[in-house]
Amino acid sequence: MSKPKRPQVGTQFRDYLNQRGENEIHEWLNQVNATVKMKINVFIQHLEGESDWRGLKWVKPLAGNGKGLWELRVEFDGVQYRPLFSRGSGSATLLLGALEVNDQFDPVGAIETALTRKASIEADNRRSIEHDFS
């Protein structure tokens, strides 16, 4: 039996799949604090219902070498969680779970990794799957 489709108003979120077909975003979310995971999923659900993200303080496009990427901005217990994603026509794809430490992304090379993953999805749309909220 297939899962029922969520109603689409704004943007459908998807998760990056690695070459083995593993959902790396879901794996990362399962490793973070349960409250953080819940906050991220609530923010994603909110964004899926909106078409205009201007004025939202917890989501922003990156500039400079991160142009073409966006970040969710989630703070919990002094830690800055920064899932990186790309946004296209009607969809957004979570590419990498990251943290912000001293104004730098952790892991090192997070932007480059996210851009590489974005390119792999653009070349092969089977490299992403509907976001897993579980």
Image (cartoon, rainbow, N blue to C red):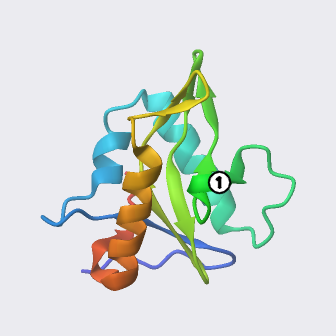
Q: Which residue is mark 1?
A: 64
Q: Secondary structure at mark 1?
A: helix
Q: Is residue 1 left or right of residue 123?
A: left
Q: Position of residue 6 (x, y in %)?
A: 52, 74
**In the image shown, does 126 or 104 lie closer to the viewer?**
104
Q: Is residue 46 left or right of residue 65?
A: right
Q: Residue at x 53, y 49 (%)?
A: 41
Q: Position of residue 106 (x, y in %)?
A: 43, 32
Q: Position of residue 125 (x, y in %)?
A: 34, 82
**In the image shown, does 11 or 67 lie closer to the viewer?**
67
| Three-letter amino acid code of the residue under disc 1 | Gly
Residue 56 in view, yes or no: yes
Quarter of the image containing the N terminus? bottom left
When the figure is inspected, residue 107 is found, relative to residue 8, above or below; the finding is above
Q: Residue at x 71, y 44 (%)?
A: 58
Q: Residue at x 58, y 78 (%)?
A: 88
- Tell me the quarter of the picture where residue 46 sits: bottom right
Q: Position of residue 24 (x, y in %)?
A: 28, 52
- Tell me the quarter of the picture where residue 61 sits: bottom right
